[in-house]
Image (tube, helix red, strand yellow):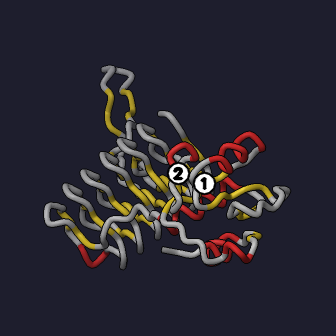
């Protein structure tokens, strides 16, 4: 188990040296914490609960006073530090590789360290970067490129044909406009379950680096989403 001295180094936290050898295994809610858990407290009320809990260590604001009986790591943003610690202590990663039930037409286009889950379909001409997690039952159509460190949750459809039609004014018929563009998803993008993102019509749809997309969101063809954007709830 990592020692608090290591965690303090990860987070740039201030820690009383007497607690340097304390070991923690994971992060937890204050109400559920055990002696091997790390919790966070962003205000005085939460800090009082954390101190009274069984937690092995507490992330708290820089202004927090020292406590001779409790291992407190003082940081600028406790909740942010807690999230960063969780990535190191309890990483939610599947093993790298392609599941036997997945259909990947061009496996040479899958980056090192990437995990392709059960039932995933990856069409020809798709490029997926390094250390991505593609959860079960994702469909990725031709002309899609994912950067590094992307997370694509179950049921996602990437590069689907956009809803674009031209109306014939004489007959009222709706004729599909060509949907032959591409979809580019940059690095560090997270895509929630059952989200759909259309390919461009003639050019591209693009999702900027660091963007996080919630479950059940639809992004239409030719959209351009910037960097570090949050899109939630449909």
Q: Residues within 10 Å of mark 2 (few under 14, many from 20)?
A: some
Residue position for label 1: 39
Camera-near label (2 vs 1) is 2
Q: Which mark is residue 22?
A: none
What residue is at 42 percent from the left and 46 percent from the top? Answer: 192
Q: Nearer the viewer, residue 103 or 50?
A: 50
Name the residue at 53% across, 67% down.
24
Secondary structure at numbered mark 2: loop
Question: Is residue 156 depicted above or below 140 in this figure?
Answer: above
Residue 50 lies, with reference to residue 74, above or below; the image says: above
Identify the residue at horizontal 74%, vertical 71% (top origin). 15
Q: Which residue is mark 2?
A: 33
Q: Nearer the viewer, residue 64 or 216?
A: 64
Give me the C-alpha separation between circle 2 and circle 1.
7 Å
Residue at image coords 72%, 47%: 47
Tell me where residue 145 appears, x and y as whole percent: 40, 65
Q: Position of residue 1 (x, y in %)?
A: 48, 74
Q: Residues within 10 Å of mark 1 (few under 14, many from 20)?
A: many
- Secondary structure beneath dot 1 equals strand
Q: Residue furthest left?
A: 101
Total marks drawn?
A: 2
Nearest the camera: 190 or 54? 54
Q: Nearer the viewer, residue 114 or 83?
A: 83
Across and down, in percent, residue 109 comes to 31, 75
User: Residue 118's quadrant in the figure?
Assistant: bottom left
Tell whether label 1 touches label 2 (CB within 8 Å): yes
- In the image, taking residue 213 as reference, residue 160 lies left or right, namely left
The image position of residue 27, as x and y in percent, is 53, 57
Which numbered disc, 2 or 1, marks the residue that appears first in the sequence?
Answer: 2
């Amino acid at each position: 188990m990592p020692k608090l001295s290591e965690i303090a180094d990860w987070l740039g936290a201030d820690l009383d040296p007497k607690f340097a050898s304390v070991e923690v295994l994971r992060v937890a809610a204050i109400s559920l914490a055990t002696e091997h858990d790390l919790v966070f407290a962003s205000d005085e009320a939460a800090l009082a609960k954390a101190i009274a809990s069984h937690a092995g260590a507490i992330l708290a604001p820089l202004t927090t006073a020292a406590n001779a009986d409790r291992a407190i790591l003082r940081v600028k943003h406790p909740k942010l530090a807690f999230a960063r610690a969780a990535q190191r202590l309890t990483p939610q990663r599947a093993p790298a590789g392609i599941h036997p039930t997945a259909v990947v037409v061009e496996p040479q286009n899958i980056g090192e360290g990437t995990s392709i889950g059960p039932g995933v379909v990856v069409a020809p001409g798709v490029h997926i970067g390094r250390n991505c997690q593609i959860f079960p039952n994702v469909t990725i159509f031709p002309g899609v490129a994912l950067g590094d460190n992307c997370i694509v949750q179950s049921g996602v459809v990437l590069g689907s044909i956009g809803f674009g039609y031209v109306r014939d004014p004489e007959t009222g018929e709706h004729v599909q406009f060509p949907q032959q563009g591409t979809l580019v998803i940059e690095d560090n993008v997270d895509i929630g379950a059952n989200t759909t993102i259309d390919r461009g019509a003639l050019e591209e749809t693009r999702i900027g680096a660091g963007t996080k997309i919630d479950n059940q969101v639809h992004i239409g063809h030719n959209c351009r989403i910037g960097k570090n954007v949050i899109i939630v709830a449909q």
